[in-house]
Amino acid sequence: MSDTLMISVSGMRGHVGTDLTPELVARHAAALGAWVRSASRTDAEAGDRPSVVLGRDARTSGPMFARAASAGLMSVGVDVVDLGVVPTPTVQMAVEFHHAGAGLILTASHNPIEWNALKFVGPDGIFLDTAEGERVRALAEQGPPRAGWDGLGEVREDPVAVARHLDAILQLPVIDVTAIQRRRFHVALDCVRGAGAVAMLPLLDRLACRVSGINLEVDGRFPRPPEPVPENLGELGRLVRESGADLGIAVDPDVDRLAMVDETGRAIGEDYTLAFAVRAVLDGRSNSAKHPTVVMNLSTSLVVEDAARALGAAVLRAPVGEANVARAMRDHGATIGGEGNGGVMLPALHLGRDAPLGLALILHLLATSGVTVAGLVGASPRYTIVKAKGPRGPELAPLYDRLRRRFADATADDRDGLRLSWADRWLHIRPSGTEPIVRLIAEAPTSSEAEALVAAGRELLH
């Protein structure tokens, strides 16, 4: 792993034209196809070729890498179901719909414009686990077996995957579509010129919302850092104030994360996305679901935990990473879950982060409660999250030991880096899976208390 090629459980990401090249993409796509064939031997023996669903975000390298990926998949005798530019959750749902052997998503998510990535999805619509990912990488390294002239795969398109995704959201019993339509919400929308407009605009139209938009072009030329964190949403805040919108919505380039700006133009932080979605689902659950469970990752805000517990739910935490949360949700029969980065996951739809789903749940909550975004935030317990980065050294274990000794009164969780927690605050230090850095995240009732926790982590990092 270099500074510009990050290899993780579910794929790899890197700088376009340096470490991440069409040759690498084709080889790893072929390896994914070979893995699918090895898992689908019975069908192959019957003469049926397995398939892989392919989708991408709007990055300028996407068309090039999509052609390379298609060639790699075809070369090992696997058919390609090409969705084109779509949200990541659309690909995950299409894998299950087509009974495909896998999915391949070309997106670097929130990374800057010079990056792109491959993300591998299993036949269950969840990103590959460690063992599966290692098997695909091994096939890439040794060279996957190629098909001859008479065994090559074919490409077919699925132009209605997004519409099918939105249909499934609007058919969820927990979402009162009529109530939302009656409110005629005015929504300010920022899609950072990623894939968002292909799903968010038709969804808002179907929910009878009026839209004031910026950065809706689907060309991958991000006008700002693409991560939907408060410091990047100033323009959206101005749009909310100038247009008089009821709320502002921002998504990341591959549309699995959603962040909100309240009616005053203030960015409220991504954790509230999941907190509001939890409220929407738990408030509307049937009486038969007497003991709901909510799963979130170790870096998710206490505002989500508070929302879940206030509505009688058990709370479980999982290591950071969508696949980890998804598998914990599946294993524990969770009602809802997700990550504090704006990722909402609802098993009744699929086990993946889904920004269109998050938007529908939030509009449902606003429509049925009659409360504004600022009102919902004001009624929630207040915490401040502070996030920082540091250089990743060769060994983090000594840092963790020093932190344990420094904070001997804390509850320690070492499943993903080290998380130290108290009743009303926590500190989480972990190596990033997407950048060559260490992430330091702390939450406390006040910013000074959270800053102090991060400062203690920084001090011991060196």
Image (cartoon, rainbow, N blue to C red):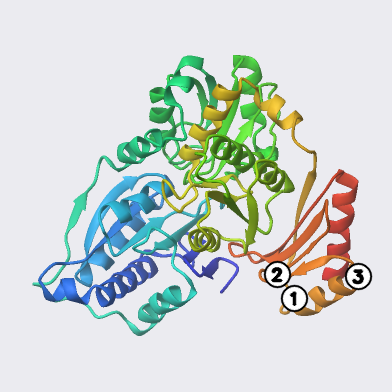
Q: Quadrant of the N terminus?
A: bottom right
Residue 75, given in percent of the width and then of the height, sits at: 22, 70
Q: Quadrant of the C terminus?
A: bottom right
Q: Closest to the observer: 70 or 352?
A: 352
Residue 419, given in percent of the width and then of the height, sits at: 75, 64
Q: Residue 223, located in which quarter of the rendered image?
A: top right
Q: Is residue 2 above or below residue 108?
A: below
CB atoms at circles 1 and 3 under 8 Å apart?
no
For residue 372, side relative to residue 447 (left or right): left
Could you tell me the amino acid type at mark 3?
Arg
Residue 156, given in percent of the width and then of the height, sits at: 19, 52
* Disc number placed over residue 396 in the picture, else none: 1
Could you tell me the amino acid type at mark 2?
Gly
CB atoms at circles 2 and 1 under 8 Å apart?
yes
**C-alpha distance separating marks 1 and 3:** 15 Å
Q: Closest to the observer: 413 or 127?
A: 413
Sequence order check, earlier mark of 2 and 3: 3
Residue located at (35% from left, 39% from top): 168
Sequence order check, earlier mark of 2 and 1: 1
Could you tell me the amino acid type at mark 1?
Leu
Q: Is residue 57 visible?
A: no
The number of callouts visible is 3
Residue 204, given in percent of the width and then of the height, sits at: 44, 26
Residue located at (86% from left, 51% from top): 451
**C-alpha distance separating marks 2 and 1:** 8 Å
For residue 218, side relative to residue 372 (left or right): left
Q: Nearer the viewer, mark 2 or mark 1?
A: 2
Q: Closest to the observer: 422 or 462?
A: 422
**C-alpha distance separating marks 2 and 3:** 16 Å
* Disc number placed over residue 417 in the picture, else none: 2
Tell me the residue that label 3 is attached to: 406
